[in-house]
Amino acid sequence: MTDACKEPIIEIADLHVAFDNVPALHGVDLSLRRGESVGMVGESGCGKSVTWLAALGLLPQRAQISGSVRLAGEELLHEPASRLDKVRGGRIAMIFQDPASALNPVQKVGDQIIEVLRLHRGMERHAARAEARRLFDQVGIPDPARRLDAYPHEFSGGQNQRIMIAMALAGRPEILIADEPTTALDVTIQAQILDLLQQIQREMGMALVLISHDLGIIGELCERVLVLYAGRVVEEAPVDRLFAQPHHPYTQGLLKALPSLETKPHRLVAIPGVVPSATDLPMGCAFAPRCAQRVERCGEWASELASIPNEGRHKAACLHVASELAPAEVVAA
Amino acid sequence: MARFVAIRLARALLTIGMVVTFAFVVLRASGDPARAMLSPETPAAAVEAFRKAWGLDAPVGVQYARYVLAIVQGDLGQSMRDGRAAITVVAERIPVTLMLTGPALALNLLLGIPAGIYAALKHGRLADRLVMAIAVAGFTVPSFVLGLVLVLAFAVELPWFPSGGAGTLRQLVLPVVTLGLGGAAVLARFTRSAMLEVLGQSYIRTASAKGVPWRGVVTGHALPNAAIPVLTIVGFMVGNLIAGTVLVESVFSWPGVGSLLVVSVVSRDLAVVQCILLVVAAAMIVTNVSVDLLYGVLDPRLRDASYPIGGA
């Protein structure tokens, strides 16, 4: 892999987030290289979106955030809004789950894109409109000149997501964060949107973070995956490694619950139990109560991400992995 | 658009027809105008003559038919008290009332809406609680109580303003405040909740995520959306203002339509009461049509007839 030598564009270290003293993230570490595509997978509420909302300062003020988020070496966390406004939409863009409600219903879609072009690229109205037309073309909205003057309710869900993508591209970001971009869409449209994301990522050479609860989608689009559970990264690996040899029992459970067209049909297995609530996390490994491989020590083991021996880029936070390692190999949080 | 206007017009006519009928029935069911208008000692023959002169001797059905027919021809009848055309009697009071309701509506909007926005932006903090505490006090106190308290405080104890009458700017202050404050309080509460609702929407997060400064998010994205539900309430408030003037004009002896209505009801001056009700109904209809048209301006989804959002 040649991209291993590329410098990281963003580095998140030991990110903690709590709402009203209830922790939602327990020290997330994540780094992303230029042009890389990384998937983040996990059940709702595991902290996938919160990680990025916190990094961009988009959480409500009552959220308590600590740790570090460095964009090309510069700290973003707790920076003044005026500085974050330059980063948001300019260097890091984000698209969201339900495109119909993510667009302002009373503003023409063209104006919503032009707003970004004026903010981040300092374009005049006339030039911005021409550029918006080009962006519409790029994301595959037919008849762009006329459709710029339409409102979000005049588009389908898939088209609205294309508009969101056009809006995200308008600032020429280095990183695009797609937060469950296809969850609210029909299956056929999902595939189109994912193709579009992939194509645009290649054309623009930007880094892509794909947040999803669907490992299948991530497997299609991403080079690397982070599996999150209850506010922690529990496994991190290149996509093919993760699919071939998942180490964390939770990842194993996710894969068993995933239907496959390639291998022979197998019975899908659900993970027993439910995600613990953030106010009532078990001691030790948060997954232990649902885990078939649980041993007594799991209840007191401080969950830490550790490299798999001889697989430097594959890490898992499981006692069974950690106990086979020398202490020096445990990656410090 | 033509269909929209036609439907509104038909609805407006239906409303007017119902108001006309309602006024007719209630005024006749609640007492004999001849008895109310004339003193108790009036001889029976004179009462009979009065009834004949005003057409009150005819069967109720005939009276109703005559009355509706006259209205259709634009004749709203004569005041029984001074014989002038009822419409003239009412029309000369309308500007006097507008002098009260206009500034009161302005007070509603200019105080209520900014206060609501401010409270929403300071949600959960001391400023929010303070504004809301004042608003709750403002709309729980009935306007006639507020009026009397204001008179006691600022006309009797501190003789800054006159306690009644019309004509000077100083006489305008207390009735306008009395009439406008309650509505401003309602509007403040409503604007606040509309803003909070909108600020929690996904498109507000989108606007922040694309780097729009917070001030721009509020003015460019939150306010235009919050204006839609607020407009509904403003429409209702015009109705409340009309109702409120009846009380406030009485408290402050303001010679407007409201006090004319009170006098005319007491003296069973049928034509004038009916005329006032028609004017009020017409005002309400004009308000509602304006609100509907403004909805279309504010919300593109309502311009599009095929879009399945509840019709206004």
Image (cartoon, coloured by chain):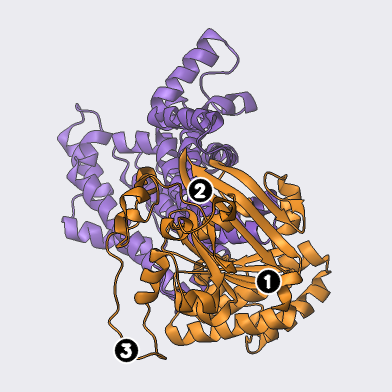
Chain colours: A orange, B purple
Residue B7 in the image: above or below residue B180: below
Q: Inspect this view and state whether residue B254 appears.
A: no
Residue ID at (59%, 39%): B118
Marks 3/2 in contact by CB < 8 Å: the verdict is no
Is disc 3 placed on a helix, strand or loop?
loop
Marks 3 and 1, how far apart at CA: 34 Å
The residue tagged 1 is A207
Q: Nearer the viewer, residue B5 or B266?
A: B5
Same chain assignment for discs 3 and 2: yes
Q: Nearer the viewer, residue A225 or A218?
A: A225
Amino acid marked by disc 2? His
Q: Earlier in the sequence, mark 3 or mark 1?
A: 1
Q: Earlier in the sequence, mark 3 or mark 2?
A: 2
Same chain assignment for discs 3 and 1: yes
Q: Check residue A26 in the rendering and tell me which mark sits there, or answer none.
A: 2
Amino acid marked by disc 3? Pro
The quadrant where residue B272 appears: top left
Marks 1 and 2, how far apart at CA: 25 Å
Residue A155 in the image: above or below residue B148: below
* In the image: residue A328, left or right of residue A261: right
Amino acid marked by disc 1? Ala
Q: Earlier in the sequence, mark 1 or mark 2?
A: 2
Q: Inspect this view and state whether residue A190 appears.
A: yes
